[in-house]
Image (tube, rainbow, N blue to C red):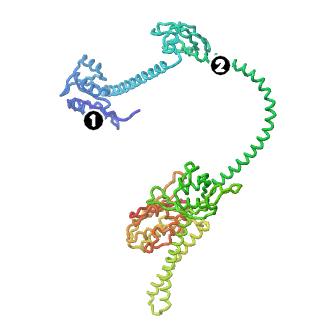
Amino acid sequence: MNTEPLNLLLIEDDAYDRKVIRLMIASQRDKPIFNVRTGESLAQGLALMAEQAAEVVLLDLNLPDSAGLDTFTAFHDAFPHTPVIVISGTDDLALAVEAVQAGAQDYLLKGEMSRNLLVRAIHHAVERQSILRTLKRRTRELAASESRLRMITDKSADGIAIVAEDGNVHFANPAAARMLDFADVPEIDRVFPHPLPGDGSVEMTVSPADGGEPLTVEMDAVAIEWDAEQVYLVILRDITARKRVEVELQQAKDTLESVVKARTAELKKANQYLLDQISERRRAQRQLNRALAEAEQARDQIDTIFASVADGLLATDRYNRITMINRAAEEILGVTWGNVIGQPVDAVINNATLLNRILTTLETGQELQFEFEIPFRQGEDAAAPQTKIIRARSAMVKDRAHTPGGVITAMYDVTREREVDRLKAEFISTAAHELRTPLTTVQGFSEILLARDDIPVEAQKKYLSYINNQALALARIVDDLLDIARFESGQKFVLNKEPANIRTMVETVVTKFQAQSEAHQFVVQLKDGDREWVVDPQKMTQVLENLLGNAVKFAPDGGQVELNGQSYQDPQSGGSFYFISVKDDGVGMTLAQVAHIFDRFYRGDASNTAVGGTGLGMAIVKHIIEAHGGRVWVDSKPGNGTKVSFTVPLE
């Protein structure tokens, strides 16, 4: 049941009457029954109705700008679908009848109205209007349904007729009228000219009145109820063409049987000869099938090997047309099998080095090893094309007669190998520099301590502190190198997990960085930070130190470092996780740099003026987080700082 209040519009110029009516329809419950708006003239009421439609209107007929039945007529013409209850101080039965006939839902006298009468009249008006709308909609639907049914019966090639038990025809569609010769005569005035069948169908012959060819008609009759009367639904189907075809088929069958009998005698004579030939051919066929199966199996094996080879393979014939290409070669060359097979190699491959080596191999028969470069884009957001380095080997293909049949070229992508070699070279240079700096400090201050006996105790402590800090830096670099060595050898982290308070661990690391970097402001917000997570405290501390160290390092002029955390429930696995993000407002990174941030030895800026580092920190962070069953990701833009986020299971 709908409990929302009804929107009601009261159009009444008398203030006392408005107050009385409002009191009558005021609710005695917590929620109002009606939302009432009032207008003091017909024009004001029409304006309020146009502004916001009301579900019921209470209308006084005598208003400052209109009087009598004209008031209702003007409002009803403007809003014909809104129920209107006339309220009047005039006890005029004729006027009341005219108002109701004109469309008013009710006519109430002001002096005789009670609260129950008015509320009941309002609700009845709404219900009657709803019923009228439903009735109109159902009437339209019924008319549309009847129109569709009439269209179907009129277009039907089968005759459809409704026949009463006394034989009178109540309805016949055009097809039935044509078959029964009812032209231009109403069906109700005709009697069905044929006896109705019982169970099953009957066939009958109908002679048209125009003297045309007789029709063969199949008739079915089903007892149904039509307007509360038991009648028969008669279906008439013109099967004249079918009968004609059946006769022709029977004649053709008879002719065919006579021909078959004549040919059978001839075939019997030839049959014996064929039997003798068949046995010999079967023997030959078995041998041929065996040979074909072996050839097919060999070809399938070759195709399977060709397709599964990890290296790219490209085969061309002696006319330099592409005969085979596997999936790896498609990816390397940026082509598809369907677009290149049978095409000249120089028409689909745009690389001078590769084309030249294929032609040279075909002309000289020499096996060649070479490299070539192919431009490509690293996704749609890449700023500029990049280059893939491909190592290839081309060799001549010969048939059993040692005749040159084409060239097979094997290719594989060595771009990553070259990039790793470059990164390793940069890493060796960087590592040497990173190791040399603390070693120089240790060596310098230790030589001072060894060479001089007059150094004050405070200065000695200061020098020893420098030596200790640089020794710790050396230890961190060595630990990073050992961790990476374990990754390279395929070893996994050995985690010593134990329960640890999240807030205590985070604030311990942040306090250390606050003491070391006074130029930066550290903001820590940890929701549910007093919970415990089961982690390796040493490894998780290493993660936090790496992330905060990068935030400080790449915002050298100071700024704000934000560390946020909160727990959450994963909807897919149902497990409990803790999310932490470290955000700085430093130099930021490009998309290309972010794509390689977790690569070993990678440094976004490898120049001599770049921020120091071995390029191992983020790779180690990724391995530690993943070893805990979590994940880590980076969001960054040049000039807008960097945000590193990770999640770790709480248990």
Quadrant assignment, res 27: top left
Percent position (x, y) of residue 433? 49, 77
Circle 1 SS class: helix
Q: Which residue is mark 1?
A: 51
Circle 2 SS class: helix
Percent position (x, y) of residue 274? 79, 32
Determine whether, in the image, residue 506 is placed left or right of residue 245.
Answer: left
- Crowdedness near tag 1: few (<14), some (14–19) or many (≥20) residues, C-alpha within 10 Å: few
* Residue at 55% across, 8% down: 207
* Residue at 58% across, 61% down: 357
Quadrant assignment, res 220: top right
Disc 2 residue type (three-letter): Leu
Image height check: is 300 above or below 121?
Answer: below
Instruction: Give the quarter of the figure containing the C terminus.
Output: bottom right
In the foreground, 499 or 627: 627
Disc 1 residue type (three-letter): Glu
Dot 1 or dot 2, earlier in sequence: 1
- Crowdedness near tag 2: few (<14), some (14–19) or many (≥20) residues, C-alpha within 10 Å: few
Q: Which residue is mark 2?
A: 249
